[in-house]
Amino acid sequence: MSRPSTPLTLVVTLLAFLLAACGGGTPAPRIRKNAKDLTALEKKELVDALLKLKATPSPYTPGVSYYDQFVLFHKQAFNHSLSAEHPVAHAHPTVLPWHRKMLLLFEDALREVSGKDITLPYWDWTDPESTRALFSESFMGTQGDASQEYAVTNGPFRKGSWSVNVFSDRPEGLAQTPHPHLVRATGRYEADVNDNIHLPTAEEVRFGLSIPTFDVYPWNDKSPRERSFRNYLEGFDPERPGYFHMHNMVHTWVAGHFRLEDGSERWGTMGAPDVSPNDPVFYLHHANVDRVWAQWEESHPGVYEDGDGHHSHHSDMYPFGEYPGERMDAHGLSAVSMLDTRTLGYLYE
């Protein structure tokens, strides 16, 4: 939902100032801002940090860039299951804490390579001004060029300047997203389902925030949307398999789906779910997913259910626990260590 300057915004800003002024004790929280409220300098610093992350070797995996390491983390989690019905970081209660951990690590990495206090902004999908600010030539770039299979040809992540290096291992993913550059056919959809492609509305977000339970049986993509805040926000539809809402719909809207003259199907970069972080828009999208969850947590403190043993919420989330070191251990490794943004050191403006 769109949030102009409000008393809450002023309180958050004042809190950050007071904590910084105190010094010595708790550091000032990171403040994640709406993309539309970034200054030109803040946009430039974020873009420069993203480009530098892409050019920096990963501290975890030889031969991989620091940026592409996060695509690998996401791919590993997407393809790892606890059982046939319970993946690790998608269609499961851990989807929200897992991605919160990923965003924190990514934000830390941006700060590490840039030497600046970079904070990820969020893209409020319900706010047309936020969408316009995000998809501009000076920031994330616009929709792709239809004459080039919707390749992104402007902005800092354009074809020829930003390469896709990590590809899907899923047969349909590799066939339908083969491009070595970013592709966005925003809002275009030529498949046989999801005929009403749109960004989530403020009303849809409000309904999600009214759901009193975090998650319910069977703790996956079949959990009833009206009773599972997690599945509602993630965006699966048990009554209409293949139809997407909320988080999933945003991936679909950004990527787009189109057919070539020979009838073959193509998705944009964000449409390959395992390697969708190849598009930097992924992080601003997920910052907003995290923001909505943080709003829900404010109204439902201490409420987190993980399926009574399908996955211990005290265990290290995969694959983060496979990479030892202070850098990875920061903020915690379990789902329950991800349940309070204030404790984790950040707030949303």
Image (cartoon, rainbow, N blue to C red):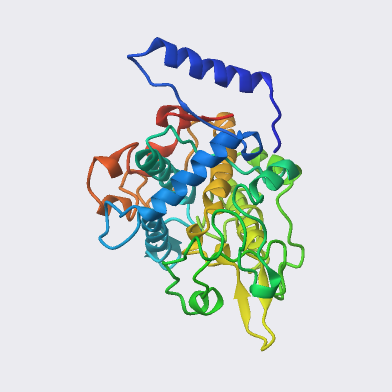
Asked if 46 appears above or below 153 in the picture, the reply is above
Taking the image as shown, residue 59 lies to the left or right of residue 220, namely: left
Residue at the (41%, 49%) spot, across then down: 52
The single residue placed furthest to the left in the displayed view is 324
Residue at the (66%, 44%) spot, across then down: 208
Give x and y (percent) for residue 194. 71, 67
Q: Nearer the viewer, residue 297 or 186?
A: 186
Give x and y (percent) for residue 182. 55, 64
Give x and y (percent) for residue 41. 56, 35
Q: Can residue 147 be seen in this view?
A: yes
The single residue placed furthest to the bottom in the displayed view is 262
Taking the image as shown, residue 16 lies to the left or right of residue 257, namely: left
Q: Nearer the viewer, residue 113 or 244?
A: 113
Asked if 136 appears above or below 176 in the picture, the reply is above
Count how many numbered circles sit on residues in the image: 0
Q: Which of 44 and 262 is in front in this view?
A: 44
The quadrant in which the C terminus is found is top right
Give x and y (percent) for residue 165. 42, 67
The single residue placed furthest to the top in the displayed view is 22
Q: Is residue 296 visible?
A: no
Taking the image as shown, residue 222 lies to the left or right of residue 256, namely: left
The quadrant in which the N terminus is found is top right
Residue at the (68%, 42%) spot, across then down: 130
Residue at the (73%, 61%) spot, across then down: 197
Asked if 217 appears above or below 164 in the picture, the reply is above
Asked if 81 appears above or below 109 in the picture, the reply is below
Q: In which quarter of the image is residue 214?
A: top right
